[in-house]
Image (spheres, helix red, strand yellow):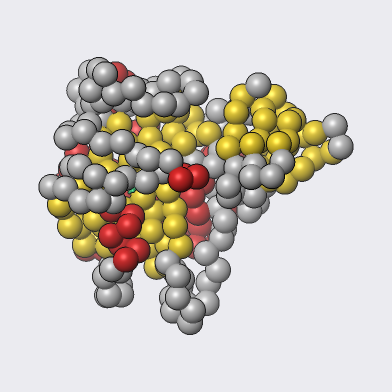
Amino acid sequence: MAAALGGDAVGFSVVLLPECDSTNSRLLADPPPDDGRVHVLATDLQTAGRGRRGRVWQSWPGASLTFSALWRFAPGAPVPAGLSLVAGLALARALEDLGVQGVQLKWPNDVLIHGRKLAGILVELLPGRGRTPAAVIGIGINRRLPPDAGVDYPTGVTDLADCLSQPPGPGRLLGLVLVQLNRLLDIYAAAGFGALRGAWQQRNAFADLPVRILGEAEELAGICVGVDEDGALLLQTAGGVRRVLSGDVSLRVV
Ligand code: BTN
């Protein structure tokens, strides 16, 4: 991991646990003090891994890289909605650097390989008024799923063992992803999501395709025409272009 982090290593504190309930839950419940570094908690096995919309992130020993990073932003800075898209883009870039082909992003932040899910992201904001805004960015990347894993995803799942002849070890993979996160979150903090929007759209799995958005209350159908400067999904509907903010919604290809 140190080799992959290179000069970025000084900016991180990384704790590795053999097992824990959920790395996101741990960092949210007991955030490390702000010492100017990004605090990362990684584990080989989560016993209560969480996904978006109340879903579960299933774990088996060695099956996935699961970690969370506590990112603090400049005092007074809003933690904007595009954060989870930036995390997805960072993950995509790290995977591309490793030689993974066909990396695509499914709004807001699943990473797909030729339509099948390789990785998921759960961003949660750290509550507390008056403190430096902070977010826990939780990432799960399938490395080698058991053959009988049976992970439920509409278009199927994949793992790195299926994408690469020589998949990286968990340490190197973690280091490469952290370097990309560092790079892109710096750009994001300075210039907003607009500076990364083009790169995200190049990898948009549903560009110009008919999709349905399943929300808590309503369902929207339209053509996915991209994302805007805030990271909201733009949907061309019969009634015009609708903005969909990342939240409790789920996107399905029609
Ligand atoms: C999703 O696909 O719905 C998001 C999955 C996020 C899983 C990661 S694994 C590390 C971190 N800890 C958790 O409990 N969840 C995230």
Who's the residue at 55% across and 28% down the image? 205
Question: With 215 as the anchor, is 51 left or right in this view?
Answer: left
Q: Position of residue 219 (x, y in %)?
A: 71, 36
Q: Position of residue 152 (x, y in %)?
A: 41, 26
> Could you tell me if residue 4 is visible in this image?
no
Which quadrant is home to the C terminus?
Answer: top right
Which residue is farthest right? 239
**On screen, 153 above or below 46?**
above
Question: With 19 as the anchor, is 35 left or right in this view?
Answer: right
State which quadrant residue 120 falls in: top left
232 or 216, which lies in front? 216
**On screen, 76 above or below 192?**
below
Who's the residue at 52% across and 64% down the image? 79
Who's the residue at 26% across and 25% down the image? 145
Who's the residue at 32% across and 57% down the image? 25
State which quadrant residue 156 falls in: top left
Q: Position of residue 195 (x, y in %)?
A: 57, 51
Which residue is farthest left? 18
| Tally of numbered tags | 0
Displayed-image quarter of ligand 1: top left
